[in-house]
């Protein structure tokens, strides 16, 4: 297959140990060949990885690789905590942020601070000015706690109106869900880039668990096929790369502006998908 190349970006999560950090640095070197537009770094729910996220972002900024986009969740944090982080990121030269509400960690208390991503977007826009890239999350298969798809879509539009410049979607294995969401958002006047989040497939049990928690659907036929392959990891990864590459091909044919890979801190899974698309 040879498919038109679109801009690529990639997400990492901060590691817990120095050995993990070195392995991840090797992954970034492996991935350099793909010339990613930016790398993003996740932020643990309720700030549970605050220092690790900051350390990884600082290290990546010092590497002079692709621009770095930290994720930041705002529930369970005070305005002062958010402000300190944003100031520290600015001092590192960071100019883009994934602005999220996040989920309340169990046992944490709501404080008087931010309650939606929209509020965080407005705050960052005010603090960082007009040049900052502010990315938000979108849910083609509907956020798990949304009451209706229409309410979800309007909440997405609000984030854009507050100043978001880009959006990355929750992952999906059903391109139609993305395409319908994109058309509906455009019909509401949303014009920013809606970049599909692409999740490689490498572990059936883990993927099922994630998907149940975040509201991403694994279609029945695919779930059955993956379940049957779950004990043969090479075959599962091979089949998974075929399926994901086919979906990317269709999304690109439908005009998506870019692709964002959830790397799970691995280079091999992305490489296999890109290989099938004819990009390496
Ligand atoms: P919001 O956009 O504020 O709201 C989520 C949903 O709540 C909306 O979609 C809507 O259904 C409803 N809602 C919001 N406002 C309103 C309103 N005014 N009226 C009615 N309904 C409303 N989590 C982490 O902890 N760390 C990460 O690094 C992280 N990265 C992510 C990256 C991506 C690309 C995605 C898609 C998700 C990520 N998440 C992460 C998960 C995210 O934190 C959760 O999905 C969280 O539940 C919602 O965050 P949000 O920013 O989408 O919230």
Image: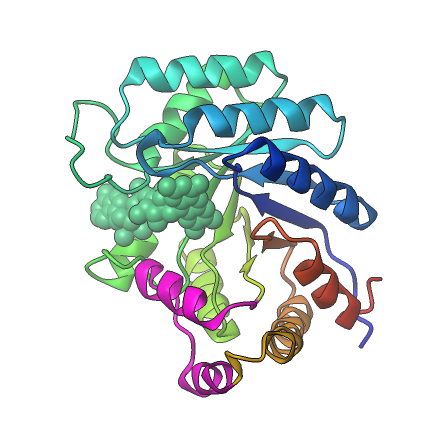
Residues 190 and 115: in front is: 115
Residue 190 in the image, given as x and y percentages of width and height: 46, 49
Check if residue 225 falls in the magenta segment.
yes
Residue 155 in view in this figure:
no
Nearer-the-camera pick, 263 or 8: 263
Point out residue 39 in the picture as x, y percentages from the top left corner.
64, 39
Query: Going 18% across and 33% down the picture, which residue do you hit?
Result: 108
Q: Which sits in the foreground, 218 or 151? A: 218
Q: Is residue 245 left or right of residue 34?
A: left
Query: Residue 123 appears at what percent x and percent y?
Result: 38, 22
Q: How many numbered marks does the figure carry?
A: 0
Pick whichever, 164 or 1, lies toward us: 1
Q: Is residue 228 left or right of residue 275?
A: left
Work out whether 32 lies above or below 123: below
Highlighted magenta segment, given as a residue range: 201-228
Image color mode: rainbow
Place residue 116 in its image quadrant: top left
Q: Which quarter of the rendered picture does the C terminus lie within?
A: bottom right
User: At 43% across and 57% down in the image, what residue appears?
Assistant: 185
The quarter of the picture where the N terminus appears is: bottom right
Rendering quarter of residue 273: bottom right
Residue 269 visible from this viewpoint: yes
Which residue is drawn at the image coordinates 78% and 60% (left, top)? 5
Does 220 appear above or below 4?
Answer: below
Q: Residue at x 65, y 47 (%)?
A: 9
Q: Relative to 245, is 86 above or below?
A: above
Task: Characterize the magenta stretch by its predominant secondary structure.
Answer: helix
Residue 46: horizontal and vertical position, in percent?
31, 33
Horizontally, residue 111 falls left or right of residue 196, namely left
As drawn, is 84 to the left or to the right of 196? Answer: left
73, above or below 259, in the image: above
């Amino acid at each position: 297959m040879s498919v038109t190349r679109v801009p690529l970006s990639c997400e990492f999560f901060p590691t817990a140990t120095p050995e993990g950090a070195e392995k991840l640095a090797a992954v970034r070197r492996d991935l350099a060949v793909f010339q990613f537009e930016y790398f993003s770094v996740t932020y643990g729910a309720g700030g549970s990885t605050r220092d690790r996220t900051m350390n990884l972002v600082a290290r990546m900024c010092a590497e002079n690789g692709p621009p770095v986009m930290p994720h930041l969740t705002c529930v369970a944090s005070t305005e002062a905590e958010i402000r300190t982080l944003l100031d520290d990121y600015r001092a590192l030269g960071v100019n883009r942020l994934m602005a999220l509400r996040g989920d309340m960690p169990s046992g944490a208390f709501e404080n008087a601070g931010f309650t939606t991503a929209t509020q965080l977007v407005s705050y960052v826009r005010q603090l960082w000015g007009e040049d900052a890239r502010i990315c938000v999350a979108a849910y083609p298969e509907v956020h798990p706690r949304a009451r209706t798809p229409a309410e979800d879509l309007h909440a997405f539009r609000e984030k854009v109106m507050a100043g978001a410049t880009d959006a990355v979607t929750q992952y999906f294995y059903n391109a139609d869900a993305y395409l319908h969401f994109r058309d509906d958002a455009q019909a509401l006047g949303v014009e920013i880039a809606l970049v599909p989040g692409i999740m490689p497939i490498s572990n059936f049990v883990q993927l099922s668990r994630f998907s149940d928690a975040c509201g991403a659907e694994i279609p029945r036929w695919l779930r059955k096929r993956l379940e049957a392959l779950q004990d043969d990891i090479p075959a599962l990864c091979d089949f998974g790369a075929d399926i994901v590459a086919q979906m990317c091909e269709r999304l690109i044919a439908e005009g998506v502006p870019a692709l964002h890979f959830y790397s799970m801190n691995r280079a091999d899974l992305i490489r296999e998908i890109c290989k099938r698309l004819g990009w390496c």
